[in-house]
Image (cartoon, helix red, strand yellow):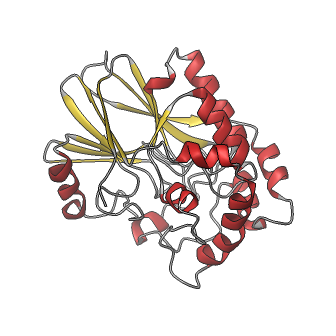
């Protein structure tokens, strides 16, 4: 199937990067407040996909994102929803805890979305390209080749390298894995800014995003923690329809399980991230 790729050409000033809103309305509200305080216009705010997910307010989240007028690519969840599929397409192992939990949160999210929100999801591209100071960026969800591919810092560079070649990019901005990191080799840079809908398995309730600034030399990625009303998010998730384990993660900062994680990332559970 042909990909929809939007090239927004040159960006200047600050660019806010984030992913995985996961129906967490309170986190999105807090992030928008950051963008306003930093004078970052909506067109310079870019999401790596999966606006819908584990939390309790999928419809409100999409509507707020739509009216904010920021940019996003599709995640696997958006594709599944707009195609009226029966599962989230997350590539969880069948019968795993993540797979079983998805049979709770995905039907819940699907039942809450309006036709207007589903129509909006159909307007979101597969990838976004842009340039900052002659550096070429491409935004992907999992990878350019597989929207549901889990790529982490410990993932071998040989797996990442073909993405740069296929997109003719210097920098890949990616999502899906839920953990923020950057990995540089061969003058190429892979950046995952993190997700704002769930903590990063580091034992803290805050979530992660990143800002890059075209006016800063040399180029650098500024990873930041986002504090938001996580207590309200947890309370709303304890509605008897969503996994209680995910509600606990919102405040504990510890994932229910580490089924998708390589060994290197498993060893970091509960430890402060150094980015």
Quadrant for the C terminus, please. Answer: top left
Q: Is residue 91 left or right of residue 204?
A: left
Q: Which image quarter is the N terminus in?
A: bottom left
* Pick the front one: 199 or 136: 136
Residue 79 at what x, y percent from top left? 49, 58
Res 230 quadrant in image: top right
Q: Residue at x 43, y 51 (%)?
A: 175
> Looking at the image, which residue is at 19% across and 40% down?
170
Query: Does residue 18 appear left or right of residue 96 in this picture?
Result: left
Q: Is residue 202 above or below residue 10?
A: below
Tell me if residue 7 comes above or below residue 157 in the rendering. above
Q: How many marks?
A: 0
Closer to the camera, 238 or 80? 80
- Where residue 10 sits: x, y (%)? 27, 22
Q: In which quadrant of the rendered view does residue 201 lie?
A: bottom right
Looking at the picture, tell me which residue is in the foreground, 38 or 65.
Answer: 65
Residue 242 versus residue 74: which sits nearer the camera?
A: 74
Among all residues in the image, which is located at the extreme bottom?
95
Would residue 141 be visible to someone looking at this image? yes
- Residue drawn where x is 57% and y is 54% of the image: 202
- Above or below: residue 141 compared with residue 171: below
Left or right of 254? Residue 222 is left
Please give left or right for residue 139 compared with residue 90 in the image.
Answer: left
Instruction: Report if residue 205 is visible in the image.
Output: no
The picture places residue 188, in percent across and down from the top left corner, at 19, 44
Residue 22 pos. (x, y %): 62, 51
């Amino acid at each position: 199937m042909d990909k929809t790729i939007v090239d927004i050409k040159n960006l200047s000033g600050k660019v806010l990067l984030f992913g995985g809103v996961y129906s967490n309305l309170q986190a999105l509200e807090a992030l928008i407040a950051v963008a306003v305080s930093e004078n970052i216009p909506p067109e310079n705010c870019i999401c790596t996909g999966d606006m819908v997910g584990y939390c309790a307010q999928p419809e409100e989240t999409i509507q707020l994102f739509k009216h904010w007028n920021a940019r996003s690519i599709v995640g696997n969840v958006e594709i599944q929803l707009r195609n009226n599929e029966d599962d989230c397409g997350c590539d969880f192992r069948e019968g795993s805890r993540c797979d079983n939990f998805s049979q709770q949160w995905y039907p819940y999210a699907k039942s809450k979305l309006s036709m207007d929100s589903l129509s909006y999801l159909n307007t979101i591209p597969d990838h976004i390209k842009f340039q900052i100071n002659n550096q070429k960026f491409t935004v992907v969800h999992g990878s350019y080749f597989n929207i549901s591919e889990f790529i982490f810092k410990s993932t071998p560079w040989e797996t990442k390298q073909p993405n740069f070649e296929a997109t003719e990019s210097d920098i890949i901005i990616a999502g899906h894995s839920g953990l923020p990191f950057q990995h540089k080799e061969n003058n190429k840079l892979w950046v995952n800014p993190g997700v704002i809908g769930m903590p990063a398995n580091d034992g803290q309730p805050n979530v992660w995003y990143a800002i890059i600034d075209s006016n800063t030399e040399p180029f650098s990625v500024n990873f930041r923690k986002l504090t938001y009303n996580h207590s309200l998010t947890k309370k709303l998730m304890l509605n008897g329809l969503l996994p209680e384990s995910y509600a606990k993660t919102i405040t504990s900062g510890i994932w229910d399980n580490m089924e998708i994680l390589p060994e290197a990332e498993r060893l970091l559970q509960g430890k402060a991230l150094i980015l």
